[in-house]
Image (spheres, rainbow, N blue to C red):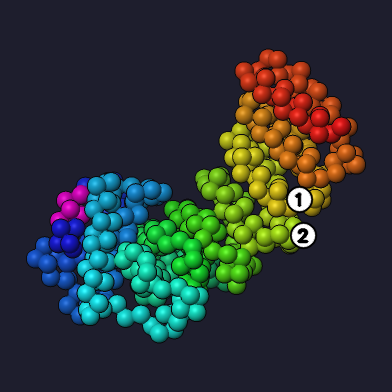
């Protein structure tokens, strides 16, 4: 398997203009044996050989979706071959129960047994990912950490990453791919390995590394419960809050991550500190970019679950929320107007808006939007939305 993969990887052309892509390709080749099938590092054990092959395949397989620019040179057929090679490796390793090259620590096994989980009951490829986590994730975390900026007290401007960014890019893609292979409930016992690594990537200065971390946390929010994420609650949500300002490059992913994480962690506690803090940060970003069509549409599309989770507590944000909604209610694009009406319907159902000073202004803006709708392409949808809101206000 490794010889075939090496030959394909060696003949794959990368973007020669991009030196980082060349570095990544060279780094992946070092994880595999040469053409003669002999490992370049003679001192590696069988477990290390398996780990190196696994990490190489994970990096190549991660290029199937959500791959960053520095991994875009990996063709789809190579990515598919790497994923299949991992499945073949796992089947070979676990088919012969007497030849167990992967030495899983007793404490790691106990953490799964305590939750009533049996790794022998899942598919071989997922089992391989889980059993290698105690080996691979500390390595991935160190690779990401080594490229973080080292700030000096006396000269902040001269601080530079201590290693090549390519190692962090590879590690972040490997992290994201590995975690995407595992779903609830098997991720829970690995939280102590997984979350510190993901947090390190989320705080990284490179957008490419950060993007992989965002995708990872969206997956974690869907496959971990509040108790499992709760051990790292403040660290996760504080990092999420810091990433909201200036996140134009991956705004949609940030909003999806923030909403999913805070709902999963805080649950049915609408008065929780982080609900207020994260909504406040997002409203601040919306106020700074209220004229940005793409950004406001994304926010309006994905904020609904957060509104529903906060319920009546949204009243505390009316002073900042409604000026934005009133402004967007007359936006030039119909999509924004329709989305605003949908969110207003939700807010009206969740709060006592009729007892607030905003109700009269809301009615006036709705009437104006109704009149403007006759010149719009989707005017009928807008009028229907206006009528629904007015009926709820009666």
> Residue at (85%, 44%) from the top-left corner?
352
Asked if residue 169 can be seen in this view, the reply is no
| Percent coordinates x, y for residue 56 in the rendering | 28, 62
Give the residue at x 72% y 22%: 383
For the view shown, which residue lies furthest in the top direction? 375
User: Where does residue 134 sit, x and y in percent of width and height?
Assistant: 40, 76
Q: Is residue 85 visible?
A: yes
Q: Which numbered dot is residue 387?
A: none
The C terminus: image quadrant: top right
Q: Quadrant of residue 164?
A: bottom left
For the point 62% across and 18% down, which residue is it? 377
| Span shown in magenta | 7-12
Above or below 383: residue 319? below
**Residue at image mark 1:** 311
Residue 307 position, x and y percent, is: 71, 48
Q: Is residue 61 magenta?
A: no
Q: Could you say which quadrant of the image residue 344 lies in?
A: top right
Residue 271 disc label? 2
- Quadrant in which the N terminus appears: bottom left
301 and 166: which one is in front? 301
Q: Residue pushed farthest left?
A: 36
Query: Of helix, strand and loop, which one carries label 2?
Result: loop
């Amino acid at each position: 398997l490794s010889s075939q993969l090496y030959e394909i990887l060696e003949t794959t052309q990368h973007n020669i203009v991009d030196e980082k892509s060349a570095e990544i390709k060279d780094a992946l080749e070092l994880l595999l044996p040469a053409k003669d099938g002999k490992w370049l590092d003679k001192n590696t054990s069988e477990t290390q050989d398996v780990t190196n092959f696994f990490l190489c395949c994970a990096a190549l397989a991660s290029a199937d979706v959500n791959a960053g620019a520095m991994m875009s040179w990996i063709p789809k057929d190579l990515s598919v071959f790497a994923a299949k090679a991992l499945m073949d490796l796992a089947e070979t390793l676990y088919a012969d129960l007497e030849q167990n090259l992967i030495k899983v620590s007793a404490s790691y096994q106990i953490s799964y047994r305590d939750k009533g989980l049996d790794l022998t009951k899942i598919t071989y490829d997922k089992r391989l990912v889980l059993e290698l986590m105690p080996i691979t994730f500390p390595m991935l975390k160190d690779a990401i950490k080594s490229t973080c900026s080292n700030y000096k007290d006396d000269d902040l401007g001269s601080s530079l990453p201590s290693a090549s960014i390519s190692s962090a890019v590879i590690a972040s893609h490997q992290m994201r791919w590995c975690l995407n292979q595992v779903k609830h409930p098997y991720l829970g016992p690995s939280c102590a390995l997984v979350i510190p690594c993901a947090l390190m990537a989320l705080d990284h200065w490179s957008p490419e590394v950060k993007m992989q971390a965002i995708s990872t946390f969206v997956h974690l929010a869907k496959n971990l419960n509040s108790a499992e994420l709760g051990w790292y609650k403040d660290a996760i949500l504080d990092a999420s809050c810091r990433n909201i300002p200036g996140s134009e490059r991956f705004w949609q992913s940030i909003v999806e991550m923030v909403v999913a994480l805070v709902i999963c962690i805080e649950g049915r506690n609408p008065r929780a500190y982080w609900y207020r803090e994260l909504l406040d940060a997002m409203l601040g970003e919306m106020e700074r970019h209220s004229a940005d069509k793409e950004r406001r549409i994304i926010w309006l599309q994905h904020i609904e679950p957060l509104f529903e989770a906060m319920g009546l507590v949204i009243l505390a944000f009316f002073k900042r929320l409604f000026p934005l909604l009133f402004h967007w209610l007359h936006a030039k694009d119909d999509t924004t107007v329709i989305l605003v009406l949908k969110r207003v319907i939700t807010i009206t159902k969740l709060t006592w808006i009729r007892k607030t000073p905003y109700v009269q202004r809301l009615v006036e803006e709705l009437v104006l939007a109704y009149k403007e709708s006759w010149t719009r392409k989707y005017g009928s949808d807008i009028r229907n939305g206006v009528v629904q809101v007015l009926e709820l206000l009666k």
